Amino acid sequence: MNTDAVHTATLDTRGLLCPMPVIKTQNKIKTMENGETLLVIATDPGVKQDIPTWCRINGHEVLDISEKQLDILISIKVER
Amino acid sequence: MSLKRKAIALVSGGLDSMLAVKVVQEQGIEVEGVNFYTGFCVEGHTHAIRKKDAKKEKRNNALWVAETLGIKLHIEDISEEYKDIVINPKHGYGQNLNPCLDCKVFMVNQAQLMLNRARDLADDGGFDFIITGEVIGQRPKSQRKETMPLIARESGATDRLLRPLCAKNLPPTLPELEGWVNRDELHDFSGRNRKPQMELAAKYGLDEYAQPAGGCCFLTDKSYSDKLSDLWQARGERRYELDDIMLLKVGRHLRPKENFKMIISREEGENRFLEGYRKAFTHLVCTSHPGPLTLIDGDPSEDDLKLAARISTRFSKAREATEATVEIHYKGGVVKPLNIKPMSANDVKPEWHI
């Protein structure tokens, strides 16, 4: 289900190293509403650890993590 | 019921800031953390780049600390504003290009702005004071008896800046005077001895924490600072972009001549990372033997590129060969093959290594 179409918004952080993908995710989610979904696309494997941790701290839900070739796709549901 | 007081803590991911948070949490204060990304943070990057670290757990320690202590964490990208601190530190550098004192003033000031912003919004989420893990005598540049009041004053935080680990060695601050925290339960740590911190961690049952050697900033590292100095010298001005400082963390850096520098990957992970920069740099690829990707920074002549190709193959499987083929990929996209003799180990001058 990790496609652009089913998400409210998509954030491309490919090429960025942690913590930049986490910072961009944080800043994007600040602008989103409860229940909306965000698809983060990244290449730094650190995101598999850091984005779920960030979500747990801030109460958002990670719906899915998958990999497509070199891309890591993380699907997040915003909880307010 | 008394009003629940709230503090904002500078969280680096190291032990001291973790303990500082814990000490005030124990007094019933609600804490949120803030972590600043300067571009020089050791956190994350190098692990992500180097393949030999691939099996190591790649975690961001600041996030991990926040989760362990059950606090929210704001991560702020200050890499643009931070350039001015690195290039023109009012209080100068430490042993290397580390502007620790200006850095601390800047970070506390950023926290102070967050505190003011929350207060202006008259939000329930407002903060009453700031905490840091500073300890008098812990760091030679920034954490000294005389720098503590300077940081409080210049950051604008003044008496709303509390250092729970060494508060008893300092004049009482607003949170202590107002009775929001009990001064008797704060600490009097001083000096470089880490034992009191370790004992306190044990008391709280914190048996796992990050112990970065030399801190969490690349600017405290001599070899990194040498590379940054070299970059400034070669450009004739003290400036940098984020990509420049990222590349200083990766590969072997050699400057065989004043007008160009080589960045040679050391292993597969670095190779992959440097591949991302291929379009922005003239680069060398050995096609006859397995070898590293080499980026060329500067303004090399054709002879210089030939020299670079000979040096580069020294670090490839062609090192013992009598001849190797190297492709020069010019920045504009033109590719030119070149047959050269790899340089012998003795001819690679030690002073070329930055």
Image (spheres, grey):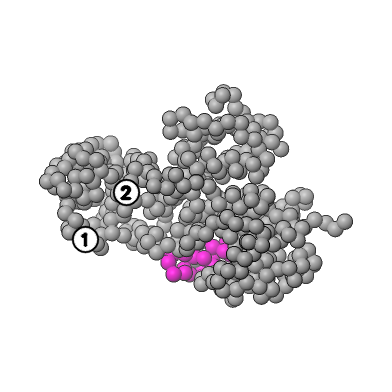
Residue B299 in picture, x, y percent from top left:
26, 51
Asked whether, in this view, residue A66 is left or right of residue A77, the answer is left
* Mark 1 or 2, closer to the camera: 2
Disc 2: which chain? Answer: B
**Residue beneath label 2, please?**
B266
Q: Which is nearer the eye, B112 or A53?
A: A53
First-in-chain label (1 vs 2):
2
Most extreme residue toward the right is B1
Region of the chain picked out in magenta, as a range = B90-107
Q: Residue at x 47, y 69 (%)?
A: B94
**Residue beneath label 1, please?**
B349
Query: CA separation, marks 1 and 2?
Result: 18 Å
Q: Residues within 10 Å of mark 1 (few under 14, many from 20)?
A: few
Relative to A21, does residue A65 appear above or below in the rendering? above
Query: Is label 1 in a helix, a strand or a loop?
Result: loop
Query: Is label 2 in a helix, a strand or a loop?
Result: loop
Quadrant location, the C terminus of chain A: top right
Which amino acid lies under the numbered mark 2 shown in the image of this protein?
Answer: Arg
